[in-house]
Amino acid sequence: MATTTAIYHREVLAASPRRQRVMGIVFVIIAVAIWLLFIRTLADPTAVATYGMTLNVEAETQIQDWVVPVLPALYISMVVNFVLGIYQLLRGFKRWTNLVLGVVVALFIFAFLTWSTSGSSISLAGLFSLTLSSAVTLTMAALSGIMSERAGVVNIAIEGMMLSGAMTASLIGSVTHSLWIGLLAGIAAGMLMALIHGILSIKYKTDQIISGTVINIFATGLTSYISTKFLQIYQDLNNPGVFPPIPIPGLVSIPFIGPILFNNNICVYIMFVVLIVLQIGLFNTRWGLRLRSVGEHPKAADTLGINVIRTRYMAVLLSGAMAGFAGSYFSIGSVGRFDNLMTGGRGFIGLAAMIFGNWNPLGGFGAGMLFGFSDALASKLSILGSAIPSEFLLMAPYIATMIVLAGVVGRTQAPAADGTAYTKE
Amino acid sequence: MENKPEPKKQNAILIFLEELIRPSSSPKGRRRGVSQAILIPVLALFTGLVIGAIFIILTSEEVYAGFGKSFGAGLAASWNSVASAYSALFTGSLGDPPVIFSALQSGDAMAIKKAFNPILESLVAATPYIFASLGVALGFRSGVFNIGAEGQLYMGAIFSCVVGYSLTGLSPWVHIPLAMGAGALGGALWGFVPGWLKAKTGGHEVINTIMMNYIAYNLSTWLLSGPMRRPGEYNPISPNIQPSAMLPNFFGPPTRFHLGFFIALGMAVLVYWLLFKTTWGFELRTVGSNPKAARYAGMNIVVVTIVGMTLSGALAGMAGANEVLGVNHNLALSFSSGYGFDSIALALLGKNNPFGVVLASLLFGTLRNGATKMQVVSGVPIYIISILQAIILAFIAAPAIIRTIYRLRAPKEGEEVLSVRGWGGG
């Protein structure tokens, strides 16, 4: 009962006048928070914050650092947020509310960042570059979840699949001295875990969440076992190297965003390709329609001659391939070796990004960027020594997910048959 | 008069067995139900150990070296690697029989303590598992999948630790219950939030509890590197708790066997009583197994879900409190080695029955304790336990696999299927 009424409840909530008022109050509270937390605590009213705009000091195109006077910036953010809040309370932004919410939150983050860098400098380009790097794994994990859940199989085993991908890619990449073979092996390892998940949950109709838990425990044990027994002892087995960055000619010389977006290693570009292919594939092709029908109403799909079981296996295997790829990015895409439990729960955040993005590939990417940004911010600010502990920033994506899940920001809806096994009658 | 207690006792044992071994609806089906309900976990464990042995052989360098020399040498090396690993697992967890025997003969108190220490350590290791998996099992019974025992454990540890070191001059009779209660409160708080969110907004507890895990973890990192850090200490570790808050150690050092074990057993009895002997427990189980029927019967699903999740969290919180008050006597960074996640497997292994859960926890406490020695003696990494655990859990969740391997017949009546409702529909 709780869930069905809740979905209805959320639908009503999304456009209700009550929600409009609540949002208006939230905007005003954020404006007041800027004043209370940042303006009142600012020690030096004439301080400036410096944003570094160049990623690489030796690059040809250098952009001037952006020097922001802190106090005016804070006042502008506060006033804009306050005005938006008042307008929301009086007239309401109606269907644009979520967009305005984005603006308000962005201004708050800007105010916070400016306040914490007052009197010193932070590399904005570095921050965004770190965001992208962090977002690659989160987005791939989210896509992996979308792939399998759109076909009606809950996949909480992404974390485990990523771990096995990371370990295998590092091991095979080191042994064969080929990053490409390593990457393929990582993808294969993810698919192998997915196959177990598929057999347990599709063939034996084990509860999908329990089956996912099994994979997570198994992959954690297996990768740590092999890593402790071999990789940590024989360094040659754990030294695959990293994919080199490939600058895209022409685009890379675009000021500011060029070096951030178009000077990455192949994994980042693959992520973008997969993202676009999946977005179009799911919503603009016959394949996607069939896949989604299996996730929404398997019985109807079966009646129309779609092979539900085969579709689900395919979806789960592809999901495993994506998770394996995401894991490989950890070891051979960024760090260059495998460490025990190196994915550190990113699979679960990817799952959160999937929900945040409402089971949509582009939404998942947006959420991945958002979570990646808070990740990057936390690590940058811990170096800067901010007054707000980095742990709280690290908590932000989790709290945001819970708020989204509770239907405050709007409605998210899982595929209707998500999590239920299908028995042919 | 003298005969009267007899049947009563039998009755109690019968009820115990019955509850341990569900399902059992008709007298005819009961026998097969009984035998398979015990047989499948046992076979799952056995199969897990066999697969573990194969795994040890496949990853042992001595075995490959042996096969390089001759086939016989390879077989001998395989046998040696498995035998040394599993015997270290056994002596490390239950003690070495000859050592125990000679210690008992010598009569030296310290020698006896040392000889029995492995088995006591196994009980110490099992204690947090009992608390946490009781919590998870209670959650399952009320229809919520509490994957957040880890976070609740952290909160329990934080709360009890603060009460443990900040209050001074209390009698242990006051301080221990206070600190333990604080731990339960911390866990309950972390269980209440996802429970409330599920009941009121439909936000799925699996995602919410995972999120709460990370929030708790980050919170503990911040607390330990800031407000709770031991004065004058650079590392993230809390001050030691007051002696009055420490759970009494029965035999003194070097053993660590403490009161927590019996508290855990007490909680198992309490949970059993609550679930199966009270109206409220009946309501909880009905909501868990058939929410539609529960709603038609006029039960308040919202309240049951929230209370179920809160109690589940409280039990997991007590696991954290137990570790702080009984074993570590302080709180350090990443003190939990995945108890929360293991407890999910244990709750399922124990079929969500309090006594089954205790048995499963004892088993895994023993395995984990023995695995430490196994790693030292035979070089088999401790992580093999996680592999075993996953395999066993897979077999428990998909008994059809075990039946296929051992050619068992499927029970006629539908057996209890382990399930969690997905986050999609109702």
Image: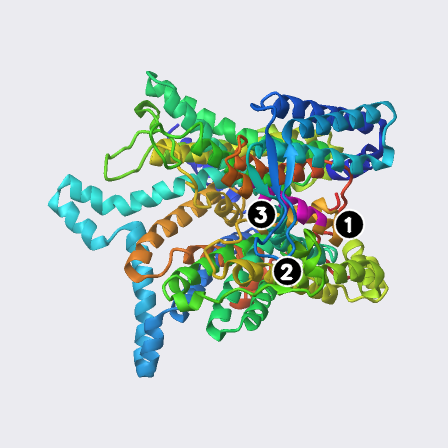
Is residue A377 magenta-colored? Answer: yes
Q: Residue furthest left?
A: B106
Left or right, A239 with reference to B61: right
Residue tagged 2: A263
Residue tagged 3: B24
Residue B233 position within the rendered picture, expressed as x and y whole percent measured from the top left: 34, 32
Give how far apart the Cα atoms at labels 3 and 2 are.
65 Å
Give how far apart the Cα atoms at labels 3 and 1 are.
34 Å
| Residue displayed at 71% across by 62% down | A274
* Amino acid of disc 3: Ser
Residue B371 position within the rendered picture, expressed as x and y whole percent measured from the top left: 35, 54
Q: Main secondary structure of the magenta part?
A: helix
- The chain holding disc 3 is B
- The chain holding disc 2 is A
Judge the density around disc 3: few (<14), some (14-19), many (≥20) Cα neighbours within 10 Å. Answer: some
* Residue A26 in sight in this render: yes
Residue tagged 1: A416
Left or right, A203 with reference to B47: right
Residue A362 position within the rendered picture, expressed as x and y whole percent measured from the top left: 75, 52
Q: What scheme was used to colour the molecule? A: rainbow
**Quadrant of the snapshot with the N terminus of chain B:** top left
Position of A34 relative to B257 (above/below): above
Span shown in magenta:
A366-378
